[in-house]
Image: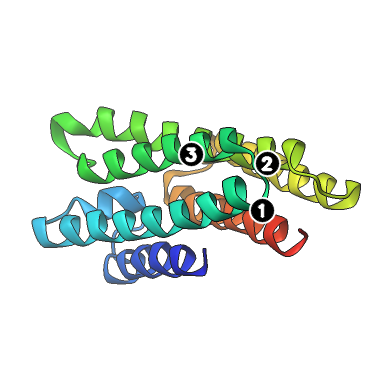
């Protein structure tokens, strides 16, 4: 899972740094600026998703025998890869946005389901569910705050999800 965290955060950080003169763009819109950067975005999400999928197989299926969590993971990864392939520009933008939100919602549901289905102690469960609440609060915040804050909400939500998974793994 650490490889997934590194791949996604490195990719997103690169996009944010190299396109910082355009603060109103989402991370995906920054990636859609040119073909090379978009290919890099696809590669980063492919690697990040694959590494997270490997983690999920071992953690959810091999360790805890909860294949439903791996099914949710797989659906989220498919949405992730598809949203990466569809550029966030022109006629494709509405499809990209739909796929990106689908990925985010599926991964949020995964965090909640993992907290409820895995045999963890009550304090860890409450912590993971509280983090899910913070992620859920990020959805209206992203829509209500000025657009220049959207990418910040994206980065916070992505890393809150990873924090949930790390806590679940370490709290096993």
- Classify mark 1: helix, strand or loop: helix
Residue drawn 44% across the image and 63% down it: 4
- Classify mark 3: helix, strand or loop: helix
**Left or right side of 94 for 26:** right
> Is 56 drawn above or below residue 167 in the view shown?
above
Dot 1 or dot 3: first in sequence order is 3
Task: Tell me whether circle 1 and circle 3 mark residues in contact (CB < 8 Å).
Answer: no
> Is 1 drawn above or below residue 103 in the view shown?
below
* Label 2 environment density (alpha carbons within 10 Å; few <14, some 14–19, many ≥20): many
Kindly report which numbered mark, 1 or 3, lies closer to the viewer in this rendering.
1
Residue drawn 27% across the image and 46% down it: 84
Residue picked out by circle 1: 164
**Left or right side of 86 for 46:** right
Task: Tell me whether circle 1 and circle 2 mark residues in contact (CB < 8 Å).
Answer: yes
Residue picked out by circle 2: 114
- Classify mark 2: helix, strand or loop: helix
- Residue 46 % position (x, y): 30, 54
Dot 1 or dot 2: first in sequence order is 2
* Label 1 environment density (alpha carbons within 10 Å; few <14, some 14–19, many ≥20): many
- Residue 60 % position (x, y): 60, 47
- Residue 147 % position (x, y): 42, 44
> Is 26 drawn above or below residue 97 in the view shown?
below
Residue drawn 27% across the image and 48% down it: 29
Q: CA distance from mark 1 to mark 3?
A: 14 Å
Question: Is 65 in front, or is 22?
Answer: 65
Q: CA distance from mark 2 to mark 3?
A: 15 Å
Number of callouts: 3
Residue 104 is tagged as 3
Question: Is 44 in front, or is 50?
Answer: 50
């Amino acid at each position: 899972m650490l490889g997934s965290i590194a791949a996604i955060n490195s990719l997103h950080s690169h996009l944010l740094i190299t396109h910082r003169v355009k603060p109103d763009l989402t991370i995906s819109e920054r990636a859609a600026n040119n073909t090379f950067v978009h290919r890099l975005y696809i590669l980063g999400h492919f690697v990040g998703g694959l590494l997270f999928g490997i983690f999920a197989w071992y953690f959810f299926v091999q360790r805890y025998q909860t294949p439903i969590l791996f099914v949710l993971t797989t659906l989220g990864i498919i949405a992730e890869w598809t949203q990466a392939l569809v550029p966030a520009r022109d006629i494709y933008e509405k499809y990209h946005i739909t796929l990106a939100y689908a990925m985010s919602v599926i991964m949020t549901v995964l965090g909640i389901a993992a907290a409820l289905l895995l045999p963890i102690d009550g304090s860890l469960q409450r912590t993971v569910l509280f983090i899910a609440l913070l992620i859920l609060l990020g959805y209206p915040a992203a829509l209500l705050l000025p657009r220049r804050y959207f990418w910040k909400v994206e980065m916070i939500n992505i890393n809150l999800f990873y924090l949930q998974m790390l806590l679940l793994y370490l709290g096993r």
